[in-house]
Amino acid sequence: MDGGAHLARPAWRRSRLAEGRSRAYAAAVDSQPAPSARSEPVRTTVAIHLLARPRVEINGREVPRPRGRKVWGILALLLLSEGPIHRGRLASLLFADADDPLSALRWSLAELRRLLGPGVMLAGDPINLDLPPETFVDVRTLASGTWVEAAYVPGIGHELLEGVDVHAEAAFETWLLTERRRVANLSAAVLREAATARLAAGYADAAVELATKLVAADQYDEEAQALLVRALVAAGQEPRARRYLAETIDRIRQDLGVEPSHTLQRAADVVGEAVPGPPWIRGAAAVESLITAGEAAIGAGVFEAGIEILRRSVADARDTHDRGLEARALAALGTAFVHGARGRDVEGATVLHEALAAAEEVAEHGLVAVACRELGYIELKRARYERADAWLVRSEAAAPDRDSRTAAAAIHGVVASDRGRTVQAIELLNGAAADARALDKPRLEAWALAFLGRSHLLRQEWEPARLALTQGLAVTRSAGWTTFLPFPQSLLAEVDLAEARIDQAAASFEAAFALGCQIRDPCWEGMAARGIGLIHATNDRIDEAIAWLDDARTRCMRIADAYLWVQAYCLDALCGVAVKHTRPEARAWVADLETLAARTGMSEMLVRAHLHRTALGDRNAAETASLFADRLDNPAVLRAISSAAS
């Protein structure tokens, strides 16, 4: 099953797939009948591997490598770009130093046709690459497959086009470096999902192996380190886990000069399951009552008590041997970890994978939808957008009713907005807000309206932004959702600032900041602090502006599982002020934004980083920005690209 609890052959073990083929591709090849005079023509299967040493396989056999390394660059660009690529542009990116760039491109395209075989169409201007329907492309499986499928990708953890030095123009070299960062982050996301799922299924040793690979990629990833420590404890290696944790905490303090998160520091704490209640009150009705009581406690902000009640509901549900009831209790507990407290997503993801496995076992589609949605929400917060998409697509497919579909669509709209796909975001969030209103789900409506307003704000569409945010703020207040209030409040203040209502904007930002600090939400503190910094910049108090904006981008990352987009948003504002006023720190801050956006797939923020580079005098940055423009549809950003290129 996709939930991972019942795999016949674990993904981390050596298999035929680890030697070069995906399961889907291998099955397609192995199922072909032997050719005969009367049989139908044998179907050709193509597998394209861009991770590690790139190669193409047709019917399971590797095709001779192409003449010319730039053939691999062309293939990667065609497969990973989301818009049309004209021949002239491709020639200028890869063959600008040739005597006849278009002729050199034609020769390389001929080599690429030979490499991919007769079943692939490669023609036209812009160039159209038409692959057979069942073609396996490793980077696409890594992005959109289930973790079970993605973990079987042979090159997972390896570099995109490993060992291939294309020697092209600076814009292409920057594009390739960016894609390598993004794909590396995708590999890490899949390893994280696989380790969490194996831990949830009780395969602690396998989880340790996977988590060890994960932390090898980034020793300062506190979520990954916490996952490894938890896996070691589950594998019965608590002394080793505590030694490793102490070493990790010391390294972070010494190397980074910061205090590790509470999530990491408590990762080795062993929390046993709650003791089941008396047998005469451990039936299904009692478990449902416990779930209701636990969710009510979490909703009221009494987190630790709510968690203990929900742990008890899981223990009692297991005692009934009712897998559906157990899945319900697990889903409630996992959701409480994700939404009821900050810094507990590692624990929440583990419990949600348990819930997913149990729900799939008994075909409880509603609970499958909930578990997938919450796992998608975790990936959204950490800006692992391709994986978030994969979970949310599963959630929407499993959703048995309008309520479940609306909740998934609302989160999906935010994923689209974060990535710069604002048309899709506005459509999803408009629909979610209307459905939530019809379903009498005020918090869901407030969420959808706030992010709808943010989408219009990013497009610099002030009137619809004000309308959505004003409505969202009213619904948030009427629902008594105080912990969400600073977000739409800060966004509406930004609309006021854009329309020169300076005093009104300043008052709103200050109110949002005070409330964010009161409820100790680092993301909302960062959003409001960013606004206060922009107020100072508007009033030509540049030193104060820089101080507030720099504080905003660090404040919002105080916990390990904070909403990463907010950090990028604050950093973008800091870059804008620093570049405009020629601050010496500007280049370093722009590099930070570029690195963050590149590894996470925040396409709009990546383009903004290159626009900042353009303003700093980088002659190639505008061309690089235009390479990523096909991934977003924000008219405000596209106008800025056009202006920078002219």
Image: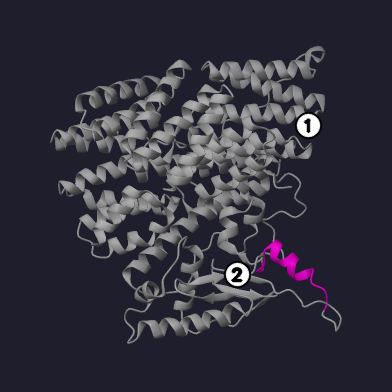
Quarter where residue 374 is shown = top right
Residue at x 44% of width, y 37% of height: 563
Q: Nearer the viewer, mark 1 or mark 2?
A: 2
Picture layout, residue 478 above or below residue 557: above
* Circles 1 and 2: CB atoms closer than 8 Å: no
Q: Is residue 296 magenta?
A: no
Picture layout, residue 418 above or below residue 174: above
Circle 2 residue: 131
Q: Percent position (x, y) of residue 23? A: 71, 62
Q: Percent position (x, y) of residue 183? A: 49, 58
> For mark 2, does the 10 Å Cα neighbourhood hold few (<14), some (14 to 19), or many (20 or more) residues?
some
Q: Secondary structure at mark 2?
A: loop
> For mark 1, does the 10 Å Cα neighbourhood hold few (<14), some (14 to 19), or many (20 or more) residues?
some
Label drawn at residue 288:
none
Image: magenta residue range:
19-34
Q: Percent position (x, y) of residue 111? A: 52, 83
Q: Nearer the viewer, residue 18 or 252?
A: 18
Circle 1 residue: 323
Q: Percent position (x, y) of residue 341? A: 51, 26
Q: Kindly identify the amino acid type of the residue bearing the numbered disc 2.
A: Leu
Picture layout, residue 579 above or below residue 264: below
